[in-house]
Image (tube, grey):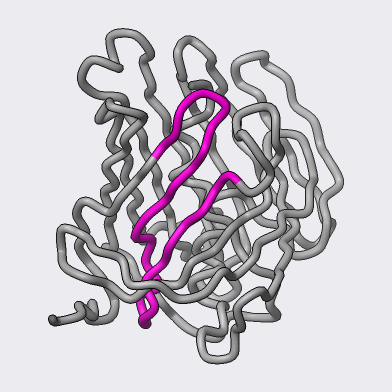
Amino acid sequence: MKKVFTLVLILCGLVVQGQTHQAFEAGEWFRFRIHYGIFNASYATLEVQEDQLRGKPVYHVVGKGKSTGLLHLFFKVDDNYETYIDKQTGAPYKFIRQIDEGGYTKDLEIDFNHQNNTAFVHDKKHNTKKTYQVEDNVHDMLSAFYYLRNTLDFENIKEGDMYSLNMFFDDENYEFQLKFLGREVVKTKMGKIATMKFRPYVMAGRVFEEKESLTFWVSDDANRMPVKIKADLLVGSLDASLDAFKGLKHPLKIIMD
């Protein structure tokens, strides 16, 4: 179960030059219901706020996950993820990861310097500080998702297209790869929603059963909002679905029968 609830926040991103669309604005809020096997395991939320960082206006995105019900008695989860991103470029300036997953804890702050291509990591749990070299156009796990929503070319993307993104997570650089699987109508509690289906390639053997064990769906409209996530894990499976939302920048398109 370690790191399972992190999956809702890892929705990846694409390498595209500049932002071509504004899919969200401050005030947007999502809540997801997460099922692990027979358990209604957790709720997770994502919220976009207006903020300032070092005198610069930014979007401050906060993601939280918390276990509920019977699972909370056996495996407590209390996660907090935050990113501060440039309003124009979507580049991250600061990333915060504070997690408690069944006693496995982390407390990290990462400051990105895009001019020098560095990431300054403050590990508050172990009281260490270290600077790492990062790749161009680097993202953290939250900023990547919001960057995707503003840069994805919905009109010209074709089934089977592959994309990659430079990411930095904890203390490691890696190239994240993503495949477009096609379009699909998903039934939700809000009604039927036209979606785009993606498969990120993940590391098999640690949390996931195979490299192709994670799939997610985003709305095929101007909002490009997350709708559904499915993961096949080494032990069991996980499903997350959009449970509630508010503050969308664009009208939500519901398919009427």
Along the viewing direction, whichever of 30 and 83 lies nearer the viewer = 30
**Foreground residue, 227 or 19?**
227
Quadrant of residue 196 within the rendered picture: bottom left
Nearest to the observer: residue 197 or residue 52: 197
Q: Which residue is at the far bottom?
A: 155
120 lies left or right of 11: right
Which region shows up in magenta?
213-238
Residue at x-position 67% and y-position 14%: 126
Compared with 164, 133 (above or below) is above
In the picture, the quarter occupied by the C terminus is bottom left
The picture places residue 43, in percent across and down from the top left corner, at: 28, 37
The percent coordinates of residue 50 (x first, y second) are: 36, 61
Instruction: Indicate whether 92 appears above or below 249.
Output: above
- The correct choice, above or below, for 7 with respect to 29 in the image is above
Is residue 37 one of those drawn in magenta?
A: no
Residue 140 located left or right of residue 53:
right
Side of 246 where 46 appears, left or right: right
**Residue 77, quarter of the rendered image:** top left
Q: Position of residue 85 (x, y in %)?
A: 54, 60
- Name which residue lies at 26% across and 49% down: 31
Q: Residue at the spot x=42%, y=50% of the render?
A: 229
Residue 247 in picture, x, y percent from top left: 22, 67
